[in-house]
Amino acid sequence: IYTNWIWCPDRYQKVTGGSFRYSVTPNDRYVRIEIRDGEGRRAWCSPFSVE
């Protein structure tokens, strides 16, 4: 998860075969999701507004 907030301790989590949950904070204006598979390939979505 990427947001406009410089530091948020729970934005990054290593998940194996599961799901991830992130609660938007009052400081977040946008969120962008990025995932990486076991071989290092990445995919992401365009940022979207959460205001």
Image (tube, rainbow, N blue to C red):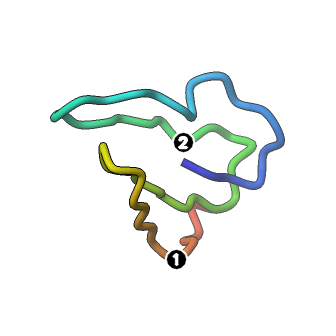
Q: Residues within 10 Å of mark 1 (few under 14, many from 20)?
A: few
Q: Quadrant of residue 45?
A: bottom left
Q: Residue 32 or 25: which is nearer the viewer?
A: 32
Residue 32 position (above or below residue 18): below
Tag on residue 11? none
Q: Position of residue 30 (x, y in %)?
A: 64, 62
Residue 16, placed above or below residue 31: above
Q: In what element is the residue under mark 2? A: loop
Q: Earlier in the sequence, mark 1 or mark 2?
A: 2
Name the outermost residue toward the left.
Answer: 17
For the C terminus, give its image quadrant. bottom right
Q: Residues within 10 Å of mark 2 (few under 14, many from 20)?
A: some
The extreme top residue here reads: 9
In the image, is residue 25 above or below residue 48?
A: above
As measured in the structure, the alpha-carbon distance from the residue carrying label 1 to the one carrying label 2 is 16 Å
User: On the rendered structure, is 32 left or right of 26?
Assistant: left
The residue that label 1 is drawn on is 46
Farthest bottom residue?
Answer: 46
Q: Depth-wise, is mark 1 or mark 2 nearer the camera?
A: 1
Q: Secondary structure at mark 1?
A: loop
Q: Residue at x 45, y 67 (%)?
A: 44
- Amino acid type of disc 1? Ser
Q: Which mark is residue 24?
A: 2
Furthest residue to the right? 6
Q: Residue at x 57, y 71 (%)?
A: 47
Residue 12 falls left or right of residue 51 = left
Instruction: Tell me the residue at 44%/36% (across/down).
Output: 22
Residue type (three-letter) at the residue carrying disc 2: Val
For the point 47% across and 57% down, the residue is 34
Give the percent coordinates (x, y) of residue 13.
46, 28
Residue 6 % position (x, y):
83, 41
